Amino acid sequence: MGNNNDTIKNRTFDAIVIGSGISGGWAAKELTEKGLKTLVLERGRDVKHLVDYPTTNMNPWEFEHRGQMPLEVQKENPIASRCYIFKEDAAHFVVKDNEHPYVQEKPFDWIRGYQVGGKSLLWARQTQRWSDFDFEGPARDGFAVDWPIRYKDIAPWYSYVEKFAGISGNKDGIPTLPDGEFLPALELSCVENYFKETVSKNYNDRHVIYARCAHITEPQPIHMEQGRAQCQNRSLCQRGCPFGGYFSSNATTIPWAQKTGNMTLRPDSVVHSIIYDESKKRATGVRVIDAKTKDVIEYYAKIIFVNAAAFNTTLILLNSTSNRFPNGLGNDSGLLGKYAAFHNYRARVSGEYDGFADKTTDGRRPTSAYIPRFRNVYKQETDFLRGYASGFSAGRSLKTNSEGFGRDLKKNLQAKDWGPWYVGSHMMGETIPKETNYLSLDKSKKDEWDIPLLNISISYDDNDEKMVKDYISQLTEMFTKAGFTNIKSNDSKQAPGLDIHEMGGARMGKDPNTSLLNQWNQMHLCKNVFVTDGACMTSTSTQNPSLTYMALTARAADYAVSEMKKGQL
Amino acid sequence: MKITRRAALRQCLIITVGAALIPSCMQDKSKPAIALKHLKLDGDEEKLVTEVCETIIPATDTPGAKDTFTHLFVLRMVDDMYPKEEQDQFVKGMKEFDKLSEKKYDKSFVEASPAQREELLANIINNDTNDVSADVAAFLKTMKKLTVQGYMSSKYYLSNVRVYKLVPGKFYGCIPVTSLSEKGPSI
Ligand SMILES: Cc1cc2nc3c(=O)[nH]c(=O)nc-3n(C[C@H](O)[C@H](O)[C@H](O)COP(=O)(O)OP(=O)(O)OC[C@H]3O[C@@H](n4cnc5c(N)ncnc54)[C@H](O)[C@@H]3O)c2cc1C
């Protein structure tokens, strides 16, 4: 037992942050900047910016299998292999199936990154704000519970995190997708601009815009202070960026927190549960299993931020049982783990365009265009609730002609004939959180660290099926009107999960009987515990959620520290 | 393009990462040059694969399959990316293919002249493949696919034909095709 080795004092901090990914990194930055001695507990290994990016400067031909994962590895990791990120250049940042099993009561591809930085190293960096069309959704359409916040509550915090993270975008003036603090946008391609024009000509309420993304297109002093430089459009982000050109915890929040001198980062620390003290009516600390030695160590703090990513956060809370909370921390309502949801990424529509034959793009671009949600925005107009946003991109490349063999083949492979423009889009559908989509603990099965396995029971419903059909028909119509040809659509029927936007489990709400967290992401029934990752989400919107986790985290940290100063916590 | 021995060795090392033995890529013996996990090929068979690669993409005034280490890539991929049944069929097809050469020229494929090799492949690839077995057809199909893939992702190709830039810098969304240099777009 490690507890004997050091005194309780050495294991006591002002704040504990569980997880060092996108949300945990922000919690660490905010709390340490405000002067709190903060312990960051991360279950995975350390990944230091610049130092621990082994593939970052490799050329394509230097990869043994030119990127592909060997068949044996694919067979051992069927879940990870279904995610596009699981390639030779970044697989070392992706959790392997057999190392961290979970139970799939229904099929769910749970993609995880267990290391300092979490999934922030791997993410696609899309950062669209939510609006009141999202926050008012449940109340208007009668599902889940009403969000306890509105856009005005979070808007200044969006600005706050955007300025620090560095978000590239255009001010588009679209009510469903509020503008933010933007660095310059990268260029759209000819055909993306053309599509933008035809769509706005053909539809009043549909827009094609440049997708906002967490890339430094023009470094500001705040970014240079972080040691980050301009994005060079390598589009190799998942390897870790030598320029710090995109937002990751590793390049941004973690080193910033480190610089305050107030952070203690402890990798290889698996949080088992949160310790609740019945007499004090608060959480006093956390129980950690050392990932390597399996020693059990307790750490103590006045406040605890839970940022292990939505489903692991829910797991920790469910596993934090006590006399007072036999069903998990703060879980008198029995709702902990319920109303889990995700984004529906099943469908794609693609095509070709014969125009702009004398034009092309040159170079790479780490983002694309975006079509904000246009369905059921101002009123209910379809036979399904809510709607979908879409990614959109149009690019062009040289044709590959591999006919023949010998000298002919070689000549064919060296030819430089242009192919048509290819256009493609994918859906990002809002799903409706339901009681029947839930997470629970399978107490009969435990992992290496003696923690019960998470059981995931999540599936699509009729609303999702209808939405897939509508997306395909609407995008096909928009493509057709633009004169695109060879239009094809595809419903991958993939299980939920590959969106990697899992949310819910400990939702926010106004009433302790119907929610776990209040408007400050504070547990209704255990006030010194804050949950600011995806677990807190009451509904899912269509927009990529991580920017919202950042903003909620900074907001909650500000609240927590001011409450502490007032002696309220 | 000239490939220095040092560059060759470096490439060789990259391809055999994880191999327990020092690779013998640069040697010309009847021992395998590359450590494989599943495929059991002797040095001659490995040479056969190498020469089939080279016949598919021969060195001309520009590098061919061997110069670009495409043969090593092909072996590595067959070894690591194909299920056992397909690997067995590959080996079977390969052996049978060599017999076709013996039958036609009284020489193994490796011993045959480049012209003969080309002729043999041309007959099979270009003409109707009905007269070769499914195994030979599968062997050649895999060889062609992987040789093309290996060549197109080789250092030579991505530095000289379609230029890959590790750090591309500015992205241009809409420029005249004619404004690109002779090398075409950077990828
Ligand atoms: C390929 C890919 C593309 C994506 N694209 C986008 C996008 O474009 N836009 C967007 O908004 N989102 C995107 N996401 C999702 C985004 O990465 C997540 O929403 C975000 O990382 C969540 O932040 P987090 O802090 O909640 O979790 P994470 O970043 O996953 O961090 C959680 C951390 O907690 C640690 N942890 C877990 N359990 C424990 C425990 N018991 N004890 C201690 N530590 C623990 C983990 O090891 C991890 O480091 C993408 C994700 C992936 C993988």
Image (spheres, rainbow, N blue to C red):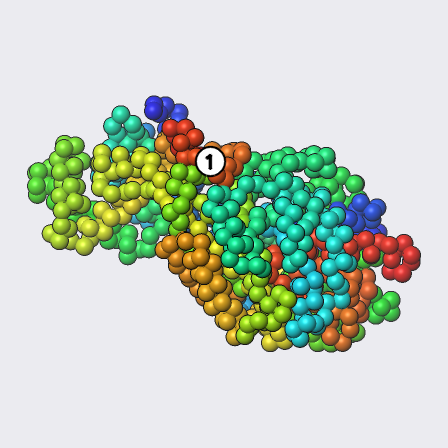
- Reply above or below: A536 against B118: below
Q: Residue at x 57, y 59 (%)?
A: A204
Q: Residue at x 41, y 61 (%)?
A: A489
Q: Residue at x 64, y 54 (%)?
A: A174
Q: Secondary structure at mark 1?
A: strand
- Camera-side residue: A329 or A205? A205
Q: Is residue A36 visible?
A: yes
- Reply above or below: A116 against A348: above
- Amino acid type at mark 1: Ile
Give the residue number, with chain letter if any, for mark 1: B175
| Label 1 near ligand 1 (CB < 8 Å) | no
Quarter in which the C terminus of chain A is drawn = bottom right
Q: Residue at x 42, y 55 (%)?
A: A350
Q: Would you identify the image quadrant in which residue A100 lies?
A: bottom right
Q: Chain of mark 1?
A: B
Q: Quadrant of ligand 1?
A: bottom right
Quarter in which the N terminus of chain A is drawn = bottom right
Image location of residue A236, percent across then percent down: 52, 41
